Amino acid sequence: MCTHRLRVRWAEVDMQKIVFNGHYLTYIDTANAEYWRAIGLPYPQGYVERYANDIFLRKATVEYLGSARYDDELQVLCRVAKLGRSSMTFLFEIYRAQEEQPLVTAELVYVNADAAMQAAPLPEELRERVRRYETTAPQA
């Protein structure tokens, strides 16, 4: 599991100083980039250039359970929960620092595609890197 910390910026809140919902996906995307770095495949050079494939977001499901506010310190947790033939399912949780209940949970499904934009099997080396990194083995 990868953990990324950030602080809510002024530009991310509305008049009530509450984070606008769309910014949570930016926080998730930033944590996802950190995950790729953590497994030794920084995006895009570590993936696109290495495998001549790319990954594309297929599905995003976000549940809003609470609200972050201006200047809150947040912790975004990210892990791969499932490795399909050509897809990867990431799970995310966003917490306010020092709190036990998540403000947001999300599931994002990415599909690996070749240069012709056709679904392609995930590279075996990627699968091995994910399995070594995760403390809870991803479902197959």
Image: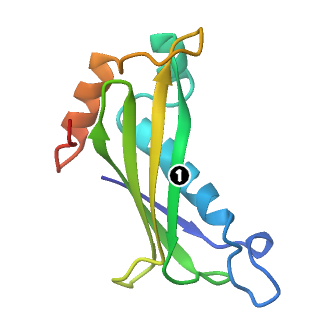
Q: Nearer the viewer, residue 4 or 102?
A: 102
Assign the C terminus to one quadrant of the image: top left
Give the vertical position of 94 relative to 107 (above or below).
below
Q: Residue at x 44, y 79 (%)?
A: 97
Q: Residue at x 55, y 38 (%)?
A: 57
Q: Quadrant of residue 76?
A: bottom left
Q: Quadrant of residue 8?
A: bottom right
Task: Identify the secondary structure beneath mark 1.
Answer: strand
Give the vertical position of 93 relative to 102 (above or below).
above
Q: Nearer the viewer, residue 111 or 26?
A: 111
How many numbered discs? 1
Residue 6's spot in the image, x, y percent?
Answer: 56, 66
Disc 1 marks which residue?
A: 60
Q: Residue at x 27, y 29 (%)?
A: 129
Q: Residue at x 57, y 26 (%)?
A: 44
Taking the image as shown, residue 13 lies to the left or right of residue 58, namely: right
Residue 10's spot in the image, x, y percent?
Answer: 77, 75
Taking the image as shown, residue 119 lies to the left or right of residue 26, namely: left
Give the vertical position of 93 relative to 38 (above or below).
below
Q: Which color scheme is applied?
A: rainbow
Q: Amino acid at mark 1?
A: Ala
Residue 19's spot in the image, x, y percent?
Answer: 68, 77
Taking the image as shown, residue 22 lies to the left or right of residue 124, namely: right
Q: Quadrant of residue 20?
A: bottom right
Q: Nearer the viewer, residue 119 or 83?
A: 119
